Image (tube, rainbow, N blue to C red):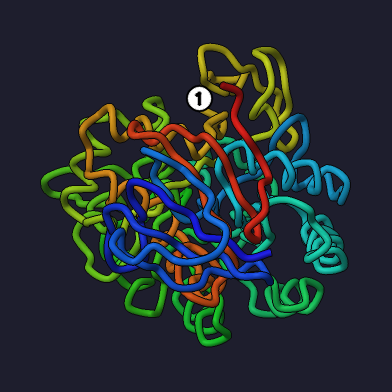
Amino acid sequence: MSYYIHAAKFFLKNVTEIGGYLEVTDDGKFGEYLPETAKPDGDIVEQSGKLIAPGLVDTHIHGLLGHDVMDNDWDGIETMSKNLLKAGVTSWLPTTLTGSFDQLNEVCKTIAAHAGDESGAKIQGIYFEGPYFTTKHKGAQNPKYFKNPSEQEYDAWQTSADGLLKKIAIAPEREGATDFTRYATADGTVVALGHSDATFEQAKACIEAGATVFTHTFNGMSPLSHREPGMVGAAMYLQGVDDELICDGHHVRPEVATTLIRLKGAEHIALITDCMRAGMMPDGDYVLGEFPVYVKDGMARMKDGDSLAGSVLELKDALTNLLAWNAATPEAIIRMASQTPAASCNIDDQCGSILPGRAADYLVLDADLKLEATYLDGKLGYQAEA
């Protein structure tokens, strides 16, 4: 049954409207927006004082509630999908870790066989974080699987994924990185750069070959100095590229995150979580890939070396963090968690914006950007406790 949402503010794709009515059609799509002075006939859902935003898009997430994409278990991925609605996420890219060719191939087959069956946040593709990395900034990735990029492996994975492999991260200093970048991007796949000790020049060469994203900027990459810009310098300086950013307050200091946002603009910052299996779980001991990890004080850390090991961030909390840090306007914050990440992975024709004819995946937020409800295809999927 169609209805109109009446709310205080609507974050539409190209404009933020104050007041008014947003149509949701019988088939769960967005319809027309009408101003406050044009009250429509029909059912009106009153969201007095609330903000209506597009569903969030998490393009870099490994796990949740004890499950990990690398477990290669569809039931676990379905559990992640359902519970991501609690984080305000309505579309996502299940994200792998480095692994063997066969491990990754089996994950591709499993997701391809079931994608579209999920009952919660919609699977819009697969993100391969690795295995074409280098060791110095390996983070929680397992270096025993690191190797040079292979077009043949990529083709096999893409075939097994039935074309769902939307993004793959590589280290620019790997032999053959630029040729691989040209090959994968010509196929329509986004190439990201990360877990790398590349020089500015090496990163720039991959960008010029077609790479368009920096993986969790500042983390797992050669740092910026005044004479060696490194990967961080490339992420900050190069135009037309998108920078992933983890805004949990642990991976990147608020002042640094704010600086990058001011420099690049909301159209080029993709908020991600990099969440691992301990997301939405209590503190304690976990495993990331093949490494033991412990979670305490909102951080996941490697037991060996104590480095950060992904996050336990929920994307809805990145919104309130950025608002508290005075990092950007509410409009910009919403864009960085929806439209920009979708565009960064070439899935913005499916999600990330409120547009007529698009699936009515939307959030109800309060004035402080706290999540109150998540709707999927126009139907209530999650309601926060009062």
Q: Secondary structure at mark 1?
A: loop
Count up the numbered dots.
1
Dot 1 corresponds to which residue?
A: 307
Between residues 214 and 277, which one lies in front from this camera angle? 277
Q: Is residue 363 above or below residue 124?
A: above
For image coordinates 23% across by 65% down, the residue present is 238
Q: Residue at image x 43%, y 32%?
A: 370
Picture quadrant of residue 173: bottom left
237 left or right, relative to 288: left
**Residue 159 percent across, percent down from the top left:** 78, 79
The C terminus: image quadrant: top right
Q: Position of residue 193 (x, y in %)?
A: 44, 59
Residue 90 place in picture, x, y as percent: 60, 53
Q: Is residue 327 above or below residue 94?
A: above
The N terminus lies in quadrant: bottom right
Graded by Cα atoms within 10 Å as few (under 14), some (14 to 19) or many (20 or more), the crowding at tag 1 reads some
| Amino acid type, callout 1 | Ser
Left or right, residue 14 beside residue 381: left
Q: Quadrant of residue 3?
A: bottom right
